[in-house]
Image: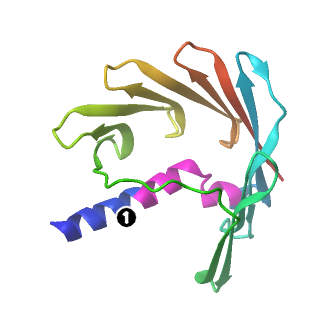
Amino acid sequence: MMVFRIVFWALFTLISIGAQGQSKKLIRTYGVKSMTETTYKFDKGVEELPHFSFIEKFDKQGEWIERKEFDKDGSIKILEKRSYAQGLLISELKEEGPQKAKEEKPASFNHSTYEYVKGLLVSEKDWSRDSTLISSKDYEYDKFGQKISEVERNSKGEIKKNETFSYDSKGFRILKLTHNAEGELTERVVYAYE
């Protein structure tokens, strides 16, 4: 049973990662060299200073070769690099920047269930040890299978946050808007490609 859980979790993680990024075919077709994510945070409707939150670089085959995730202050949070030979991954490097002190966490329990429609994740639910719903996420997609909406709810079914995604005519994700429970804009993420 444990092996099944590990295999399921690994498969789900790979599907999730693929769903978040752009397809290799799209990257290759349009000769995209890099994707930059710029995050704009909002506090009570007032836009704070934007910051680069993520940069991803691609090779000619559409494979990512470098990823940088940044903290709000501009320092590198995570740096990942990959090398390929004849289309095969041969080397991978992951470096994390200094982390802020973390408190010790008590033992925890995590049980999640997933619902798919035509191969697309449409619902994700987190449950407590006594099978009480803790939170849920619902996903919507356009006719091309691109995620256009992600709604997170609490245990009572009330919306915690709502994210919407926009794409250009070629299928590249260009914008993500995040609204809180009150419907206020809390974050705007802009994606740029070279």
* Quarter residue 127 falls in: top left
Judged by its main secondary structure, the magenta piece is: helix
From where the camera sits, is residue 32 visible?
A: no
Residue 15 lies in the magenta-colored region: yes
Residue 28 lies in the magenta-colored region: no
Q: Give, as a three-letter code, the residue at label 1.
A: Ala
Nearer to us in this view, 107 or 67: 107
Region of the chain picked out in magenta, as a range: 13-27
Q: Is mark 1 on a helix, strand or loop?
A: helix
User: 131 above or below 71?
Assistant: above
Mark 1, residue position: 10
* Quarter residue 135 falls in: top left
Nearer to us in this view, 116 or 4: 4
The x, y position of residue 78, in whole percent, is: 68, 63
From where the camera sits, is residue 17 visible?
A: yes
The x, y position of residue 24, in whole percent, is: 62, 61
